[in-house]
Image: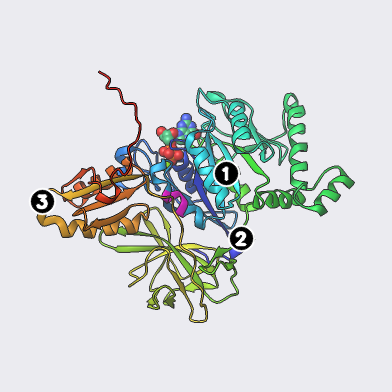
């Protein structure tokens, strides 16, 4: 793989309700980006992103995965995420290092519960938002209803149409693009479209949407606004600048349409990402523990942030990082600013699910992984000695579910403790504590499903049988006042 510069990198987190099509879209993007020669499917359990057995069994994403595609001389790092709220920790991790969120809306259902929850995390983390109405090929798809819901719930003034489908359902094959002011007509098996003139029947609607888009693009830049008043329109270059500014300020959430499954519309979304989505240096930087903002900058001394750790059999710990400043090269020695330890980067990888591609260097803004770091954990900062800051750890929602766990066989107690510590490393929203007072090991988590998945791993992968049960209530938390409750036993 070639060495990319900061302006050639895009970090995109895929978000959206479970089942909206994130993993399927990621697969299509990998195909369009030349990483794979054949598209797998979630049903067949052969996508690059959902590579864990438990994901195949459940036919849904449980872990986030780091992928990439090369398109238009740009490296698009794609962070695919689970949609279920129990696994929101993974989504928050990805959003923390992404520079743009790509939110999928399922055209069958419009805005769903998960859509709103994740939109709030995007807002809190100030991430630019691209909306993609997916599954437009589905019988029950309604672009219009989806857009109505999106405008109502995500911001009437922000949701801005760039594309709409000419027809929906099984007839979906053409997209009217009001930025290009062209019609994109896709072959049966998707891929590259024919670029055609907008049919006469659509010109009025397309012109109106184009004008709204131009105004919206001009709104974010005074110079563009003046140009717009002078000329009554903007050039493609000016439009791109205005839309990018709108994205960064979260004033403009551009809307695209696609069928991830049929690979219709996907290449145009990648085109937009490569031309208009901000590069890592164009968005706000990371905060340090002293609340100092460090912007992505290739010319500053090297610093990087470890945002995720996974454990894989035969390999051990894989540390995923984002380079924030300078560059990291193979063989480089960096200091861990959290514990002052030294770490050598013997190998650098770009990852696509479980596949790793060796590279020799990575520049500020890029996302990569390495193995066999000695004493570095998630949320740690690694840097050259001249860097004295430490990045702020990612913060996660408070636990909402609590359960006690014990091994069926007492002899497994130590092994269980060890595995639970590892589980916390992989998913920081799983918090494990051993309560001496209660003589119990308590897991605090985001939800029951999350704990069941953990149990499945303990039982099936690590072959240690466990039992879950309700934790005892510590004495000091027992009822201290009488509550008036009206409880009626129903038969
Ligand atoms: N008809 C149709 N089905 C789709 C499309 N995209 C995804 N699906 C299906 O929707 C289901 C959920 O997709 P998946 O990619 O796992 O969604 P995720 O949970 O957001 O990752 C799977 O059965 C996919 O095959 C699409 O564009 N059209
Ligand atoms: Mg998925």
Nearer-the-camera pick, 219 or 199: 219
Residue that numbered label 2 is attached to: 284
Give the color scheme: rainbow, by chain, secondary structure or one colour: rainbow
Q: CA distance from mark 2 to mark 3?
A: 51 Å
Q: Relative to 40, is 71 on the left or the right?
A: right
Dot 1 beta carbon under 8 Å from ligand 1: no
Other-residue count near label 3 (Cα within 10 Å), few / some / many at <14 / 14–19 / ≥20: few
- Badge nearest the viewer, 2 or 1: 2
Question: How far from the left and from the top, in percent, is residue 199?
Answer: 72, 28
Residue positioned most to the top? 491
Describe the element under mark 1 as helix, strand or loop: helix
- Badge nearest the viewer, 3 or 1: 3
Q: Is residue 92 magenta?
A: yes
Q: Which residues are magenta?
A: 89-93
Q: Quadrant of ligand 2?
A: top left
Residue that numbered label 3 is attached to: 409
Residue 195 drawn above or below residue 433? above
The reply to whether the C-beta atoms of the residues labelled 2 and 1 are less than 8 Å apart is no
The earlier-in-sequence mark between 2 and 3 is: 2
Residue 267: give its label. Answer: 1
The earlier-in-sequence mark between 3 and 1 is: 1
């Amino acid at each position: 793989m070639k060495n990319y510069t900061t302006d050639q990198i895009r970090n995109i987190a895929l978000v959206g309700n479970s089942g909206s099509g994130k993993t399927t879209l990621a697969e299509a993007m990998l195909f369009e980006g030349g990483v794979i020669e054949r598209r797998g499917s979630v049903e067949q359990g052969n996508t690059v992103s959902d590579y864990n057995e438990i994901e195949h069994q459940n036919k849904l994403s449980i872990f986030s995965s780091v992928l990439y595609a090369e398109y238009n001389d740009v490296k698009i790092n794609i962070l695919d995420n689970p949609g279920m709220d129990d696994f929101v920790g993974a989504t928050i991790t990805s959003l923390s290092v992404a520079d743009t969120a790509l939110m999928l809306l399922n055209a069958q259902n419009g805005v769903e519960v998960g859509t709103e929850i994740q939109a709030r995390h995007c807002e809190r983390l100030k991430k630019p938002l691209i909306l993609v109405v997916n599954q437009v090929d589905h019988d029950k798809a309604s672009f219009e209803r989806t857009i109505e819901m999106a405008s109502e719930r995500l911001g009437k003034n922000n949701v801005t149409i760039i594309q709409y489908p000419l027809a929906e359902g099984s007839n979906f094959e053409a997209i009217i693009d009001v930025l290009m002011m062209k019609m994109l007509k896709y072959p049966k098996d998707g891929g590259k479209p024919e670029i055609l003139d907008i049919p006469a029947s659509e010109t009025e609607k397309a012109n109106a949407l184009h004008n709204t888009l131009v105004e919206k693009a001009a709104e974010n830049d005074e110079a563009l606004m003046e140009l717009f008043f002078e000329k009554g329109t903007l050039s493609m270059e000016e439009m791109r600048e205005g839309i990018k500014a709108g994205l960064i300020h979260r004033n403009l959430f551009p809307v695209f349409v696609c069928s991830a499954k049929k690979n219709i519309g996907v290449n145009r979304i990648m085109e937009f990402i490569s031309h208009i989505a901000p590069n890592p240096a164009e968005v706000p930087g990371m905060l340090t523990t002293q609340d100092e903002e460090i912007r992505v900058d290739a010319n500053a001394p090297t610093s990087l942030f470890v945002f995720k750790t996974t454990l894989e059999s035969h390999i051990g710990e894989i540390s995923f990082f984002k380079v924030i400043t300078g560059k990291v090269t193979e063989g480089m020695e960096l200091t861990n600013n959290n514990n002052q330890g030294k770490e050598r980067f013997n190998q650098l990888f770009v990852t696509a699910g479980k596949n790793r591609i060796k590279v020799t260097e990575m520049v500020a803004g890029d996302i990569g992984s390495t193995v066999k770091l000695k004493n570095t954990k998630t949320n740690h900062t690694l840097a050259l000695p001249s860097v004295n800051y430490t990045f702020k750890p990612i913060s996660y929602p408070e636990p909402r579910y609590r359960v006690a766990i014990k091994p069926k066989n007492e002899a497994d107690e130590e092994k269980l403790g060890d595995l639970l510590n590892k589980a916390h490393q992989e998913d920081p929203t799983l918090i494990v504590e051993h309560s001496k007072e209660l003589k119990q090991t308590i897991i605090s988590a985001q939800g029951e499903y999350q704990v069941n998945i953990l149990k499945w791993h303990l039982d099936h992968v690590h072959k240690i049988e466990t039992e879950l049960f309700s934790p005892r209530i510590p004495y000091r938390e027992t009822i201290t006042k009488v509550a008036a409750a009206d409880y009626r036993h129903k038969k």
